[in-house]
Image (cartoon, rainbow, N blue to C red):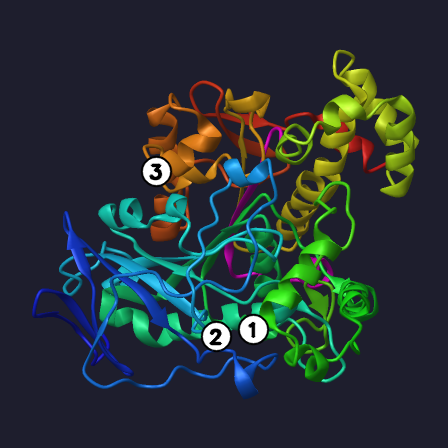
């Protein structure tokens, strides 16, 4: 254990860290410490620069409220009603939260060496422009209740975190995540966690970030296990990724440099960013922010690095939702508006072979052209790359790989098992109104219990409770109905991409 130990300070649970003493809140044997700085505020001379370690403080620092969120705008209607995205004002957005069983000191959960409890670090999604660790759905109480130290992280978003400039480092948001994981490595023992049993997990852009962390030499040794929810290895070249930065610069009428952007009022910068990226979505594309191959954080495309054996010793759990596309297509009416002609045009734009599309159309004769397009796009972005990665890891004799699929259909707006629906089940936060906005009021509690327990078991032991990936392609399906192991689901569609 660290020399910095958990203790009790006046009026609440306390933890003494290298930077000073924190006072959190205690409820039902779970202590929470919120808004802990892991790096200095990225403003002034530190704007558009790599994160610098947080500075020490005097006395006791209150840690009972979420810290500042990264500069961002809410989701546009109608998604704003489905995806809560709270905003907390302030400059110190490079902060994190910890939920831990209390008292934190003492033996862990019986893991290897019993050096403390298993740790899970949550990296939120939001297309690299939305989200924060303050989203109520991500409350870490249930994980701490079940013996896991849960950490959730804020990182820079949008142009501040993923702009591409000639005079600033790339991948600043990813560098923030690495800085947060370094903080966990150095501090988590004081909260009762084992720094040698850290699992990173994330969804959507958070999952894409984790795939990049798995591939990055700068993150090596900072975690032992990883969970990729509805994401896959993805990155762009600097030249391609720079186009979004240049489009924002053109709108602002300033040079596409960090020096010029640093002189732009933050609200004006956010307005320009929203105008440029607001019409895109993960399926239909458009201007967006990307992780980039920069030769430093990422020497090459993460998919290639992982195929070549990067993080071969890291146990991996990954999966998708059955109807990912419906979050992007249904609320905006795309499933109704996309006809056969538009489908063919968008398939060409997305470089999806007519032969592959034919297999999907023939297997889904009752579905509308927009629905078939959505499944094709989501499979290309998510399910197929995950299957390929699992196969690469199997051939390379790596640590175990597990796949899942979440299939419980939400009744809300006909979204079915859409993107992000699994989050309330993983965090076991079905009772929160922010979760129910997407699930409705009657989501099956037993399914949340099973899914949450699988994530806890994976963090503690590396085994979520089903057979690891093998040539029979086993996938644990969470709903509809009782969780069950299925071999090679929708195999004809998957194989169509191989030919």
| Front-lying residue, 140 or 189 | 140
Instruction: Tell me which segment is drawn in magenta.
Output: 303-323
Which residue is pictured at 78% across the width and 29% down the height?
A: 373
Q: Secondary structure at mark 3?
A: loop
Whether 413 is drawn above or below 317: the answer is above
As drawn, is 434 to the left or to the right of 159?
Answer: left
Crowd rating for badge 2 (residues with CA inside 10 Å; few <14, some 14–19, many 20+) = many
- Residue 23 in the magenta stretch? The answer is no
Q: For mark 3, what is the residue?
A: 428
| Front-lying residue, 83 or 321 | 83
Question: Label 2 near label 1: C-beta < 8 Å?
Answer: yes
Q: For mark 2, what is the residue?
A: 179
Q: In the picture, residue 112 is in which quadrant?
A: bottom left
Asked whether the viewer can see residue 220, the reply is no
Q: CA distance from mark 1 to mark 2?
A: 6 Å
Q: Quadrant of the C terminus?
A: top right
Which residue is pictured at 72% across the width and 74% down the height?
A: 294
Which residue is pictured at 80% across the width and 78% down the height?
A: 255
Name the N-terminal-most of marks 3 and 2.
2
Question: In the rendering, at what x and y percent does residue 71 appear?
Answer: 54, 64
Question: In the rendering, at what x and y percent does residue 216 appear?
Answer: 61, 69
Q: Quadrant of the N terminus?
A: bottom left
Q: Secondary structure at mark 1?
A: helix
Q: For mark 1, what is the residue?
A: 175
């Amino acid at each position: 254990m660290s020399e910095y130990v958990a203790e009790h300070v006046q009026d609440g649970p306390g933890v003494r860290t290298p930077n000073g003493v924190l006072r959190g809140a205690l409820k039902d044997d779970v202590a929470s410490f919120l808004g802990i700085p892991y790096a200095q505020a990225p403003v002034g001379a530190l704007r558009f620069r790599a994160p610098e370690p947080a500075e020490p403080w005097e006395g006791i620092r209150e840690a009972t409220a979420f810290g500042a969120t990264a500069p961002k705008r809410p989701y546009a209607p109608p998604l704003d009603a489905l995806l809560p995205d709270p905003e907390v004002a302030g400059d110190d957005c490079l902060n994190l939260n910890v939920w831990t069983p209390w008292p934190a000191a003492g033996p862990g959960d019986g893991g290897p060496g019993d050096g403390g409890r298993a740790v899970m670090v949550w990296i939120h999604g939001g297309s690299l422009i939305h989200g924060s660790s303050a989203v109520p759905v991500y409350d870490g109480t249930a994980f701490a209740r079940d013996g896991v130290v849960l950490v959730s992280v804020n990182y820079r978003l949008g142009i501040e975190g993923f702009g591409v400039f000639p005079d600033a480092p790339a991948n600043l948001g990813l560098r923030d995540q690495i800085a947060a994981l370094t903080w966990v490595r150095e501090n988590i023992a004081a909260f009762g966690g084992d720094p040698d049993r850290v699992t990173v997990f994330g969804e959507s852009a958070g999952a894409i970030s984790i795939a990049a962390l798995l591939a990055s030499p700068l993150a090596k040794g900072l975690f032992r296990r990883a969970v990729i929810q509805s994401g896959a290895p993805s990155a762009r070249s600097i030249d391609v990724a720079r186009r979004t930065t240049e489009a924002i610069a053109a709108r602002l009428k300033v040079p596409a440099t960090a020096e010029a952007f640093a002189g732009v009022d933050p609200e004006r910068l956010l307005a320009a960013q929203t105008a440029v990226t607001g019409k895109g979505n993960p399926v239909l594309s458009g201007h967006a922010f990307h992780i980039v191959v920069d030769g430093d954080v990422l020497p090459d495309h993460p998919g290639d690095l992982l195929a070549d054996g990067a993080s071969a010793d890291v146990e991996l759990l990954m999966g998708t939702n059955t109807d990912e596309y419906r979050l992007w297509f249904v609320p905006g009416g795309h499933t109704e508006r996309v006809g056969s002609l538009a489908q063919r045009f968008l398939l060409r734009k997305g470089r999806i072979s007519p032969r592959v599309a034919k297999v999907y159309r023939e297997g889904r004769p009752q579905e509308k052209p927009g629905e078939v397009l959505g499944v094709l796009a989501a499979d290309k972005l998510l399910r197929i790359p995950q299957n390929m990665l699992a196969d690469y890891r199997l051939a390379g004799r790596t640590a175990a790989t597990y796949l899942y699929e979440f299939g419980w259909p939400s009744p809300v707006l006909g979204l079915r098992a859409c993107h992000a629906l699994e989050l309330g089940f993983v965090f076991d936060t079905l009772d929160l109104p922010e979760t129910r906005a997407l699930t409705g009021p009657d989501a099956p509690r037993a399914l949340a219990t099973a899914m949450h327990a699988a994530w806890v078991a994976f963090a503690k032991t590396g085994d979520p409770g089903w057979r690891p990936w093998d040539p029979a392609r086993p996938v644990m399906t969470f709903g509809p109905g009782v969780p069950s192991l299925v071999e090679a689901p929708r195999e004809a569609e998957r194989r169509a991409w191989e030919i």
